[in-house]
Image (cartoon, grey):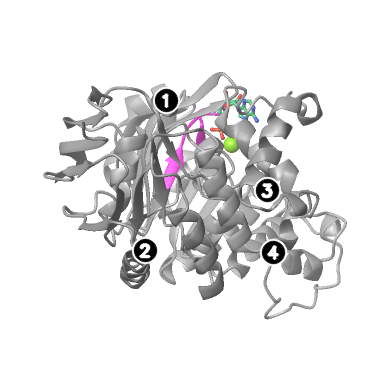
Amino acid sequence: MTALAVQKLQKSFGGLRVTDAVDLTVEPGERRLIIGPNGAGKTTLFITGELSPDAGSITLFGRDITRVPSHRRPHLGIARTYQIITLFPRDTLLRNVTLSLLGLSKLRWNPLIRLDGQPALIAQARNVLARVALDHLAERPLAQTSYGERRRVEIAMALAQNPRVLLLDEPFAGLSLEERRDVLALVSGIPRDVTTVMIEHDMDVALDFAERMRARGVRSSPTRARGRSILSSDALVLSEVDAFYGDSHVLHRVSLRLPEGRLLGLLGRNGAGKSTSLNVVVGLLPPRHGVVSVYGRIVTGRAPEAIAAHGVALVPQGRRVFRSLTVRENLAVAGRRPRGESERRHQIAASLSGGEQQMLAIARALMANPRVLLMDEPSEGLAPQIVAEVMATIRRLKAEGLSIVLVEQNPKLVFDVADDIVILNSGRVVLEGAAAEVRLRVAELHQHLGIY
Ligand SMILES: Nc1ncnc2c1ncn2[C@@H]1O[C@H](COP(=O)(O)OP(=O)(O)O)[C@@H](O)[C@H]1O
Ligand SMILES: [Mg+2]
């Protein structure tokens, strides 16, 4: 019986029809390598259920799983690698792995849970580490482990779910040659009863891998992914995103596109899901369904710093700067060397005016030299004249070619600078289109935004 069969998957995406997306047949015990700069990633997405196809089928050991929701698929024997949660770099490896396992379990994202009260999870985390011979690093701060060590842990975490089919999404990405060797040894040591499908975007890495596997006498069959990229080269795409806080379902199939160099106004009343959408993009809240891509690269499920490395920066709501630090220190903690220092660099941030703090928050985001800038209500609580200054800054950034998502409650501010508008209401996209057209739909604006 075939382990995994994917047939004639079809999907339309914001008007772009993707036909003949994927046909794939993998035999039990096979090591399958899928190579493709763009089309490859979507295979994983369909197989794991993060995207639902319009047509076509996926069978797992003869069982049709096309309509099985993503959270049920691991129970049927499919596992994929997820990045370890690296939000807590100063915390130990053990604690971070435990948190990541928690993220995969049914207890997921319950903010009230205490890890100390989860001995079974902690034991499982220790097992994961032992399986890749990293148990001696359990108490080491995550920040002091290498990428290669973390990648080994991620693969072990997937194996801990005892899958029959394991999906490895770019297991070699970002690793040094030596680390690749370690990960390769691990991948080739995966028990033969686990069918493995590996996705690799980087052609050189993929061919190198296939070569090395052959040298070890392992049958590995490369496939070129066909079909166009569903996710295109837009600066940012959200596709069918569902997000939850605990059991509370906050985003419902939210899709939006930000073409390069444009400004998307994201509008909605308080509580509509605007900030949540941005949290999903920057990796603070992994979605339960759907995909986020940045310039065609799928970043869903990646750690926040990995997404930042793809060029995404967030100016958070409420100008979150560290109020006890000086301007210079604030810029320094943003991760880059402060450039173009102003005469105010030694001033404590808390003593800056609201407008100055907002500018500082923007400057912090820009330090990372992003390609995509997300701004969450930058005008909130500022005097009109200061708002005008902030808006002028946003215009200038756009003129410099940045792709921007501007979140606002006040539509009047947005219509003047935005190319496109998306309006959220109760976590759903209720209105979208070119700014010039949307601004004329007064009755709907009134309905979804209230005051307009
Ligand atoms: N950390 C959280 N935990 C639980 N619910 C949250 C959390 N943050 C936001 N929410 C809820 O999610 C919904 C969307 O909130 P949010 O994205 O902040 O809206 P907006 O930014 O559009 O004002 C609201 O119902 C809000 O109460
Ligand atoms: Mg908000």
Cα gap from disc 2 to disc 4, whole angstroms: 24 Å
Q: Amino acid at mark 2?
A: Gly
Cα gap from disc 1 to disc 3, whole angstroms: 35 Å
Task: Say which of marks 2 and 1 sits in front.
Answer: 2
As drawn, is 213 to the left or to the right of 227? right
Name the residue tied to disc 3. Answer: 87
Q: Farthest residue toward the bottom?
A: 340
Q: Amino acid at mark 4?
A: Ala
Circle 4 SS class: loop
- Image point 77% across, 27% down: which residue? 114
Name the residue tied to disc 2. Answer: 261
| Camera sees residue 142 | yes
Circle 2 SS class: loop
Name the residue tied to disc 1. Answer: 448
Residue 267 magenta: yes
Q: Are marks 2 and 1 in contact (CB under 8 Å)?
A: no
Of labels 1 and 4, earlier in sequence is: 4
How many residues crowd around disc 1 within 10 Å: few (fewer than 14), some, or many (20 or more)? some
Name the residue tied to disc 4. Answer: 334
Q: Are marks 2 and 4 in contact (CB under 8 Å)?
A: no
Of labels 1 and 3, earlier in sequence is: 3
Cα gap from disc 3 to disc 4, whole angstroms: 15 Å
Q: Quadrant of the C terminus?
A: top left
Percent coordinates x, y for residue 98 in the rendering: 69, 37
- Image point 63% across, 42% down: which residue? 128
Task: Say which of marks 1 and 4 sits in front.
Answer: 4
Of labels 2 and 4, earlier in sequence is: 2
Q: State the image quarter where residue 337 is shown.
A: bottom right
**Which stretch did the figure color magenta?**
265-274
How many residues crowd around disc 4 within 10 Å: few (fewer than 14), some, or many (20 or more)? some
Q: Which label was assigned to residue 340?
A: none
Q: Amino acid at mark 3?
A: Leu
